[in-house]
Image (spheres, helix red, strand yellow):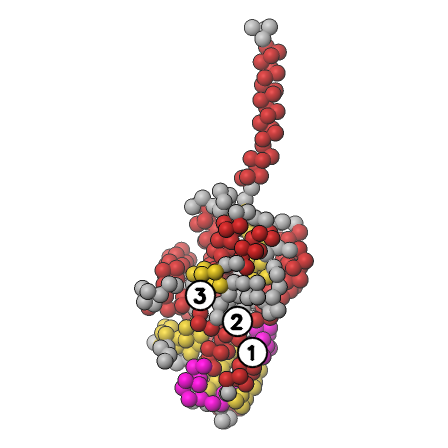
Amino acid sequence: MKHFAPKRAALRLFAAAGLAALLPAAALAADPIKIGAVVSATGPASFLGDPQDKTLRMYVERINAAGGVLGRKLELVLYDDASDANKANTFVRRLAMQDEVDAIIGSSTTGATMAMVPLVEGAKVPMISLAAASVIVEPVKPWVFKMPHSDRMAAEKVLADMKQRGFTQMALLSDTGGFGKSGRTETLKAAERMGLKVVEDQVYGDKDTDMTPQLTKIKSSPAQAILVFGTGQAPAIIARNYQQLAVKQPLYTSHGQASMEFVRIAGKAAEGIRMPSPALLIAGALPDSDVQKAVSVAYQKGFEGQFKIDVSTFGGYAHDGLLMLVDAIKRAGSTDKEKVRAAIEKTTGFVGVSGVYKMSATDHMGLDVSAFRMVEVQNGAFKEVKQP
């Protein structure tokens, strides 16, 4: 037996060496797909970022439980920018340079997203924003896409509803943040195109707690309807001020208020307010023939069942962004960044809770105004306004 020991030892060493040679490839195949994310889970924009945080975590867990993507698990590397654009810039740098993620989702606000864009473009990492302003994808930036409907689309949807009601003069009340500024610009352009006269053009700070001076001016103006373009809690304060002043002109908001949180904060003052919204807010009332019903109802049930809070359109953008990214990785058959970027850009017919997306080399949002439904708050709930 001793005569064969050296040969057996040599065979064991050879086998071990062979296994070691195979380990790097096996380990590489098992490496997770790293999805970076920056959201405003805390701070003034937490009403956007918190449901996005929850949605991303929930769906990464579900995808991994179902076997992952391309035989690999997803690893979510998620940072909270606390509604601070400077922090968003710091975190996206970390995601690209230190964490070496395969793609990025975020951030929740236009300001934070725009702080991230230059580094993303320089690092050539595909990024899907969860913020709304048109400037994010106009002009087109090769590595940047976004899920939410644009401020231009929101303005057009609201103004079309005003015109259908016979209004020809309107008032605009917008916040001084990135979303409000962009929304104001797009509304003024849309009004000129669509033949509505803006007779009052008022602004407010997103942290202001009383907008009665602006509303008092609007009340006494010839405006026949009012559009509030902003995010956060301020539009709910405006709704309460509007009710206190007994303003008669119909009140509209942008899609930035398309959530039950707005209704909860505004209370009875929310009644009668109209706004453009994705199908998600009226998912249960959609006809079975609507292609968005199944995916919207499934997301709503899953989210509300797990977190015991109302679903929001803002979380819906995270749902669509993550699932579109996963779909692109599958079609690319790889996490090669250029291949994934190209696959996102070629996305067509992707049914999300926010619309049916059709991306292209000239359109990195992939939605048009038909993706919006006009809704009105009635008895504390959103109801679709049937338009001719």
Residue nearest the observer in this picture, 194 or 13: 194
Give the residues in magenta.
160-185
Tell me which label, 3 or 1, sits earlier in the chain. Answer: 1
Answer few, some or many: residues within 10 Å of disc 2's Cα (few below 14, many 20 plus, some between 14 and 19). many
Quarter occupied by residue 88: bottom right
Dot 3 and dot 2 residues touching (CB under 8 Å): no
Quarter occupied by residue 383: bottom left
> Relative to 90, does residue 201 appear above or below in the rendering?
below
Dot 1 and dot 2 residues touching (CB under 8 Å): yes
How far is the residue under mark 1 from the one under mark 2? 9 Å
Query: Residue at image x 60%, y 73%?
Result: 178
Disc 2: which residue = 150
Residue 209 drawn in magenta = no
* Residue 335, x across and y down, in percent: 56, 48
Disc 3: which residue = 355
Q: Which quadrant does the N terminus fall into?
A: top right
Which amino acid is tagged 3?
A: Gly
Residue nearest the observer in this picture, 264 or 193: 193
Q: Secondary structure at mark 2?
A: loop
Tell me which label, 1 or 2, sits earlier in the chain. Answer: 2
Which amino acid is tagged 1?
A: Glu
Query: Residue at image x 63%, y 62%?
Result: 117
Which amino acid is tagged 2?
A: Ser
* Residue 341, x across and y down, in percent: 57, 56
Visible residue check, residue 72: yes
Which disc number belongs to residue 186?
1
Query: Residue at image x 57%, y 66%?
Result: 362
